[in-house]
Amino acid sequence: MTTLRKTFYNSFFSHIYIEKEAYSYPVTQQIIKHYPKAELIPIGHYKDVFNRSGQNYTEQKKSPSLILAKSHSSLIYEGAPTCQNFGNNRFYYTSCVMNCIYDCEYCYLQGMFPSANLVVFVNLEDTFHELERLLAQGDIYLCISYDTDLLAIEPLLGYVKAFHAFAASHKGLTIECRTKSAAAASLKELAPLKNFIFAWTLSPPSLQETLEHHTPSLSQRLNAIDNALSLGFPVRLCFDPLLAVKDWKEKYSALFCEVFKRIPPDKIQDASLGCFRIPKDFMKIMRKQRKDSYILQYPYSSSLGVLSYEKALAEEILDFCTLELTKWIKGDNIYLWKE
Amino acid sequence: MEGAGCLLFAFTLMLIIAAALYSEAKPFIEFFNLKKDLYFSSFQVFRNEDTVLYITGTGPMEAAIVTSSFLTRESLSGSDLLLNVGICGSRRKDLPMGTPILCNKLIEQETGHTYFPDVLYTHPFIEGSIITSFCSAENSLFEEASLSFADMEAAAIYQAGSYFFQPHQMLFIKIISDYLMPATETGDKAIDVSGLVSSNVRIIAGWITELMNKIPHKTNDFTREEAEYIEELSRNLKLSVTMEHELRQYLRYYKLVNGDFFPFAMHLAEELPLPVKSKTEGKKYLDYFKKNLL
């Protein structure tokens, strides 16, 4: 399949669609320079490409294009109820990039966006202006890498560095950068900040191999975490989504053992646990796209428009994993996502 | 879409070719050895087992109407490909006549609307954008005109085709036949359309045949036998439509995890007094199925 992907499908970002308004931005020029052989296609508005009807998400995922656009809104949104706020009241997320280079079977982006192409909003400074306005009203907790994996594309965009610099000069802002990447080099350029948290999502190796396509292995992610900790960054571990696959107890027990064999638990800021959950409308689309995915085709139960495991099973998973995790992390530092 | 009739595994992948003129179509008719399909009287259709070609006529209006009319009558599968092939004018004089162009952006001159076929697969062609208009694109006001190619059908075929195909299933290959010069400057020389297309038919057909062989075939989740069994079981359990969907989801999951649901489902059904007498009884047995299938 890998060989087929290399020879049959165009390489990632072989086609770059560029809004006329986005063309002169430095990050646009940087990307064009990065992909000198890409076909550059001028467009009027990113939605002309991104929102086309009938796109095949699964096929596009094998050869995603890049769409460079200028956003006319602030791109800062209030956190969704299905997301963990880690005890923060003013919880926002930003979506300066839409879609991800990884291809996780359970990912909600497949149901949320009509296209697998990546949209990069090139006018990051407008997001910073809006953040300053919000910060004038009080402290903010901001997730910058929800609808994408910013660290995975940091060599291309440099957005993590830009948010890091902004966080350095705005103490009322706490940023979480969630990732599955193993990009260690990008971190070396940054000084550790208390208000800039790197959050790694971790899954049992067998699930990473079969469900999290194109992502770094558990071992590579643990190396990256180790590196981030040794540089002095606050690190959060996200065991989310927890999946009720065959032998899930053994798999998650082994995962926690492996993680804390490699990572000093006392250096971890906190950890989060959450069972797989997804808006019903998203799942309807995702199931059509991936008919062969056992993780999507599981008959989840529905509650208030969200699909997840039956309450008893969800509680059993969370209770078990919490108990396991408290062998290494204090209970106060474990955040659970509960309905 | 989940009736038994559309839950089949086997189908033949079709290549559907649209050409405006017979002279553009002829090299493909000969290459694929297509025979005239006399069922169609208002426009010409040629076909063999896995390739069909229809002639749209000239201009966007005809192209869209004929495309809609033809595709409505075809039974398409989710993996078929639509190829629009023909000649085009070029504003790029650095490209020789007869150069095939794969269009990645289609512009409708009259409205300025743009359409983007997905270019997901590797190919041997030069890419470019094309302006489709009712008449010559010589005086186009488009700022990209200097980089573009021009024809009279592509954007219209895309618009009609998008009701039947996904953006990655539609391919537009145009062969440069002129440089959009007024006729007096070209000396009124007749263009050998078939000759230009003929010189490219092998490369285009070769590429698309390879594509057809490698493109992932969409498969449906249940075989006809499985679908019929589910329908019968649902009838015997007096399930509502929602409950039948629920049963399908459990069986679909069971099949993905275990490879086959038949032996286990039949074993479960053996113990039940089917058909049930009431919907309440059916619901009770559906819960029994759900509990055991997970």
Image (spheres, rainbow, N blue to C red):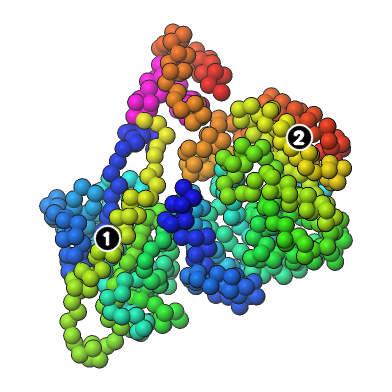
Name the residue at 69% across, 53% down: A182
Circle 1 packing at 10 Å, graded few (<14), some (14-19), many (20+), is some
User: Mark 1 = which residue?
Assistant: B205
Circle 2 packing at 10 Å, graded few (<14), some (14-19), many (20+), is some
Q: Where does residue B30 sit, x and y in percent of width and height?
A: 16, 61
- Left or right relative to B195: residue B108: right
Name the residue at 46% across, 28% down: B259
Residue B223 is one of the magenta-drawn residues: no
Q: Chain of mark 1?
A: B
Q: Amino acid at mark 1?
A: Ala
Residue B247 is one of the magenta-drawn residues: yes
Residue A257 tag number? 2
Q: Nearer the viewer, mark 1 or mark 2?
A: 2
Q: Is residue A83 visible?
A: no
- Left or right relative to A290: residue B222: left
Residue A211 against residue A248 in the figure, above or below: below
Q: Main secondary structure of the magenta part?
A: helix
Of the pair B42 and B36, the residue shown nearer to us: B36
Dividing the picture into quadrants, the one containing residue A239 is top right
Q: Where does residue A267 sit, x and y in percent of width and height?
A: 86, 46
Specify whether disc 1 shares its chain with disc 2.
no
What separation in Å lies between label 1 and label 2 (alpha carbons)? Answer: 56 Å
Q: Amino acid at mark 2?
A: Cys
The residue stretch that appears in magenta? B224-252
